[in-house]
Image (spheres, rainbow, N blue to C red):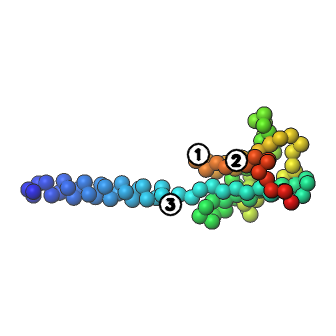
Amino acid sequence: MTCSQRPSRLRLKAALLVLCAGFSGSALAHNPMCECKAIDAEQIKCTGGFSDGSGAPGVTLDVIGYDETILVPGKLGSDSTLTFKKPGAEFYVLFDAGPGHVVEIDQADIEAP
């Protein structure tokens, strides 16, 4: 190896190290989580957050009919929850924290009180 090749290889190793460091951040990404439970026959409470234990205050949580109309537009409160009146129509809950951070919960998957 000549002296002129050594700096080139060092730069390549440094570039690979920086590239790998960038990928390790994505490996530590947090996944969205949302759970909805019926409080009683009329009220449903949903709690959202992320797999790293962080909450999701202010994140959009909409109740959507099967015809794609928004039945209850909402955002999670400071405690990362939203309570709403159970719609009369069939619905699902959409927790939307941005691209790649979406959770859908069908009404059939909501736990009874």
| Measured Cα–Cα span from mark 3 to mark 2 | 23 Å
**Residue lying at 86% horizontally and 40% vertically, measured from the top left:** 89
- Foreground residue, 110 or 87? 110
Q: Which residue is mark 1?
A: 99
**Residue lying at 61% horizontally and 61% vertically, measured from the top left:** 51
Q: Give the image location of residue 22, x and y in percent.
A: 41, 56
Q: Amino acid at mark 2?
A: Glu
Marks 3 and 1: which is nearer the front? 3
Q: Amino acid at mark 3?
A: Leu
Q: Amino acid at mark 1?
A: Pro
* Side of 59 where 41 appears, left or right: right
The dot on residue 104 is 2
2 or 1: tag closer to the N-terminus: 1
Most extreme residue toward the bottom, as rendered? 53
Q: Give the image location of residue 49, x and y in percent.
A: 66, 59
| Measured Cα–Cα span from mark 2 to mark 1 | 13 Å
| Measured Cα–Cα span from mark 3 to mark 1 | 17 Å
Most extreme residue toward the right, as rendered? 41
| Total marks in image | 3
**Residue lying at 80% horizontally and 42% vertically, measured from the top left:** 91
Q: Which residue is mark 3?
A: 28
3 or 1: tag closer to the N-terminus: 3
